[in-house]
Image: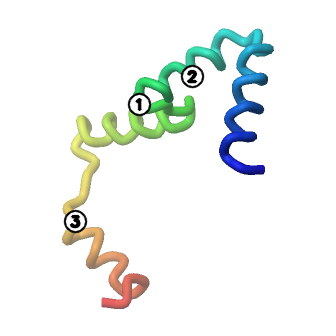
Amino acid sequence: MNSYAQKLDIIHWITELQDVSVLEQINLIKENTPVLSILEEKSIEEGLDHFRQGKVRSHLQVKKRYEKWLGN
């Protein structure tokens, strides 16, 4: 299917769409606003919580811990 046919197919699908949440996501994509899944948002929040609690390691600490897999 070429890009013109794909666009027509998407236009047709959107005109039939009833799910408002999907329309909102499409609008976010159109506006170049990042769309994160619930899992991604949760993962980011967990990382920020770890940072706030001081549960972090420096780049050098991580690199040293995994150097045998990194091939350095």
Q: Which one is in front in this view, the residue at disc 3 or the one at disc 2? A: 2
Residue 49, percent across and down? Answer: 33, 34
Residue 12 is left or right of residue 36, and the answer is: right
Q: CA distance from mark 1 to mark 3?
A: 31 Å
Sooner in the amino-acid sequence: mark 1 or mark 3: 1
Q: Which one is in front in this view, the residue at disc 1 or the one at disc 3? A: 1
Vertical comparison of 60 with 55: above or below: below
Sooner in the amino-acid sequence: mark 1 or mark 2: 2
Dots 1, 3 in contact, CB < 8 A: no
Residue 21, percent across and down? Answer: 64, 14
Q: CA distance from mark 3 to mark 2?
A: 35 Å
Vertical comparison of 61 with 28: above or below: below
Q: Residue at x 73, y 31 (%)?
A: 8
Q: Which one is in front in this view, the residue at disc 1 or the one at disc 2? A: 1
The residue that label 2 is drawn on is 25
Indicate the amino acid at tag 2: Gln
Vertical comparison of 19 with 63: above or below: above
Picture quadrant of residue 32: top left
The residue that label 3 is drawn on is 59
Q: CA distance from mark 1 to mark 2?
A: 11 Å
Q: Nearer the viewer, residue 17 or 64?
A: 17
Residue 1, percent across and down? Answer: 78, 50
Q: Residues within 10 Å of mark 1 (few under 14, many from 20)?
A: few
Determine which of the numbered discs, if any, sits on residue 32 in the image: 1
Vertical comparison of 65 with 30: above or below: below
Dots 1, 2 in contact, CB < 8 A: no
Q: Residue at x 50, y 29 (%)?
A: 29
Residue 51, percent across and down? Answer: 26, 41
Sooner in the amino-acid sequence: mark 3 or mark 2: 2
Residue 50 is left or right of residue 19, and the answer is: left
Label 2: element kind: helix
Q: Residue at x 74, y 14 (%)?
A: 15
